[in-house]
Amino acid sequence: MRVTNMLPDVQYQMQQSQQALSVALQQVSTGLRVNQPSDDPAASANLVASLAASANVDQYTANVGSVLPQLQTADASISSVETTLNSAITVGISGANGTNTAANRQALASQVQGFLSDVIAQANTSFQGNYVFGGSATGAPPFVAASTSFASTQGSAGSPLAPSTALTAGSVTTISDATTGDKMVFKAKTGDTVATLQAAIAGAVSAGTLSAGTSAIINASGQLAIGTNSSTAGIVVNSNDAVLGSMTATPGTVVANAYAYVGNSGTNNAQVGDSLSVPTSLPGDQVFTTGSNVLGSLNSLITALQSGTTAQIGTATSAVSAALNLVTQARIPLDNSISQLNSQESYLGQETVTLTTQQTSLVGINLAEAATNLSQAELTNSAVLAAAAKVLPQTLLNYLAPG
Amino acid sequence: MSLNASLLTAVQALSADTGALQATNSNIANANTPGYTRKVAILQEAAPTNENNLSVGNGVVLEGYQSVRDELVQTQIQQETQAQSGANAQLATLQQVQPTFTTSTQDIGTQMSALFSSLSGLSTNPNSSAAGEAVLTAGQNLATAFNTASNTLNSQQAGLNTQVNQDVNQINQITQQIAALNPQIAQLTSTGQDGGTLQDQQDQLVLQLSALTNVAVTKTDNGEMLTTGNGTPLVVGSQNFALSTTTNSDGMQDVLDQNGTAITASITGGDLGGTIQTRDQAIPGLLSQLDTLANQFGTAFNAAQATGFNQDGSAGQNFFTIPTSVAGSAGSIKMAITDPTMIAASSDGSAGNNGNLANLSAVQTAALPAGETPGNAYASLVYQVGSLTSNANAESTAIGSSLVQLNNQLSSVSGVSIDEESSNLITFQTAYEAAARVVSTIQELFSITMSMGTTAAE
């Protein structure tokens, strides 16, 4: 073949080797084999998925970090309640001793009152604004002082509510009873009226959910009034029905030492793994009111110490003991969650390493390989340049005698 | 045989050698001129004369000059140039699109993960307005990432659309020049001469045209006939047919032939072909997937939001504002809410409940109507951008190396070798010197002849 000019070939070779050099340089300086999707489309697509998984793992780790102190706070609260209940039992036992004077018992009763306040404070514990014993309703204190009577804000003497007044479908009215520790939830359906609510309350009374005597009436001001007929039975009523308006406690009807649970029976959960979530709040009624009523038993003990017989004090003290057992049991799942979080934390640490390794193998390059590539590219490039320098100046004119 | 005849032969030799030197001169002068084909002087023995039954040679005749060409390689180079320009046009655009889809702190994938992370963060602390704000910020960032990607694709498409007009203008200029050369070359070839420099110019113009569009060349008696697309004439004889453009219903420039018929889809090569292919297929393909992802993601997120309740207990409203039509969704998706209490975290309306956040988070792992999870849908978009770019790059590189080969082949036939011309120079110089010596010898013989019969000075 007739060769006329080697320049285009040499230029092409130089371009190729310089391109290889630039790629090798980029790999060494970034530590990455894939710097843009076109370098390896499949690896780039896999990287997207892997990075999303990494972001999740990072977030799970952060979640463990914020959930753990929350659960530890709840645990510390229950532990503190246990101590308080033990003290209450000691007080109850000494109060049951027949040698006590009435004055002594009054003193003991006020001591138990203090214990009850302590327990309420613990039951309303919040961590960074989240009430941990409110079930999934973590936005407000779950235990509130109960009153004997509540009235609706809607309705007036001029335009009274009536049994036939239709309720808003989908609205929820709840009556939390401090004595039974239970609550009635009434969700209005289409066609429900005030009379339906009244019937539901009567049903809840006969079922034992609400204290005997609890009823709803239209009062003289034309409002719906829900109340107990006992000065010692307290309830808390909430409603989001626009027809009734918010339910407010009648002033002066607060029952001493009676607290009702206004949280719910759900839990908030936080994801700490792709398929693992832990509760971040507990339904406080299960710990403090339902089954064996911690708050109710303390209240009974106070009443018994104030005005009861030795036997009544003994019974009330036993009830507090039973309540203590329940609290201790309620702590078990909480402790399980805490230890689960601890082990999840170390698992997530490993997972991060695994994913990072995966990402490195997808788009990274190890330094030794990159350095080898670079020195090879360097060698090739200098060889091409040296060859070009030798070949290009070669011409017959160099050898012809001038002139 | 007369001295006169011999002198004539020697003078013809002088003139032939001068002619050959002129060819060498021209070759050396144009050694680096693009498109130049080397010329050779065609020397031929002059017809002999018969004298007394003796046939005597009459020396040399310079018949003319010939350019040394290889039409086949020339055609191959034109075709490869079409393919390379097409691939380069695609590559240039895709390389600008690619950074938008490269993993960074701002790409859609990262922002999508950030949104789900922020939701997960909110679930551990549903009453925190800071955690709520983080969700809103992440949502806003994701919407912005969608907007940016859509804008990048749209502005590239608009740029390509302008390029179509520029290419068509250039094509028209070049075809005009080619058409003007046709009659001149035809005139030369009709008299049996070589097209020479004019042919070089025309070949070079056809090569330039090949860089712009797919061209088919047919040799006719009236010069080269050029067509593009599916046989749309560009040049016939001395006549060139200008292409034109018009805005179609999509707002894009269509290419029209001289009759006003749209031939956009049949332009497959050259810069124009690559530009049209990227503008009408690659970018709309990516845009439509991006729009579908933005639309379906936004819809799924809004649906999850609707299953829950705000902090104030009212039913969840739309999180993203998305247009009803899928097209343009990525460009116009934006946040519908600005208040963190409007995030429908609650599943039952109670304040502080985080039950519905699980539904919002589930959007990450649930398949969208298009069949993939949002993350995977984005990953396949990344794959496509990467694969389109890397294919265009590979094509351009492969053609580049084959063009180097073809150019070597062509220059092996048509290229000027300085060494070769240098030795030709010596050859013809020597021949010229020798012929001149013959002239002076004959001159001496003449003077001897003239002094015959006079007394020679002893």
Image (cartoon, coloured by chain):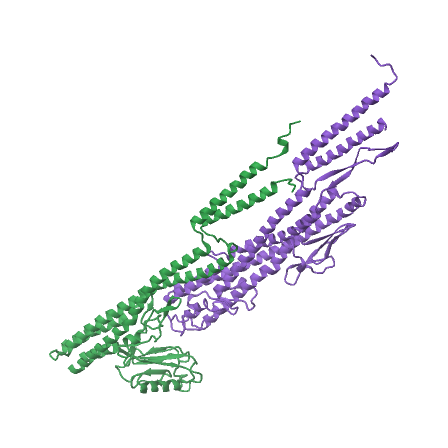
Q: Is residue A370 left or right of residue A13?
A: left
Residue B180 image offset from top left, x and y in percent: 75, 47
Q: Colour of chain B?
A: purple
Q: Is residue A188 above or below residue A332?
A: below
Q: Is residue B137 visible?
A: no
Q: Is residue B120 above or below residue B17?
A: below
Q: Is residue A56 left or right of residue B192?
A: left
Q: Which chain is green?
A: A
Q: Is residue B353 left or right of residue B16?
A: left
A236 or A281: nearer the viewer = A281
- Measuring 62% from the left and 60% from the top, which residue is drawn there? B280
- Residue situated furthest front in the rendering: B53
- Residue situated furthest top in the rendering: B458
- Measuring 77% from the left and 45% from the top, which residue is drawn there? B185
- Measuring 61% from the left and 46% from the top, which residue is drawn there? B404
Residue B236 image offset from top left, x and y in percent: 76, 52
Residue A196 image offset from top left, x and y in percent: 39, 86
Q: Quadrant of residue B291?
A: bottom right
Quarter of the image for the N terminus of chain B: give it.
Answer: top right
Q: Is residue A74 above or below residue A365?
A: below
Q: How many marks?
A: 0
B272 or B400: nearer the viewer = B400
A134 or B265: nearer the viewer = B265
Q: Is residue B287 visible?
A: yes
Q: Is residue B73 above or below residue A362?
A: above
Quarter of the image for the C terminus of chain B: give it.
Answer: top right
Residue A121 image offset from top left, x and y in percent: 27, 70
Q: Is residue B347 left or right of residue A322?
A: right
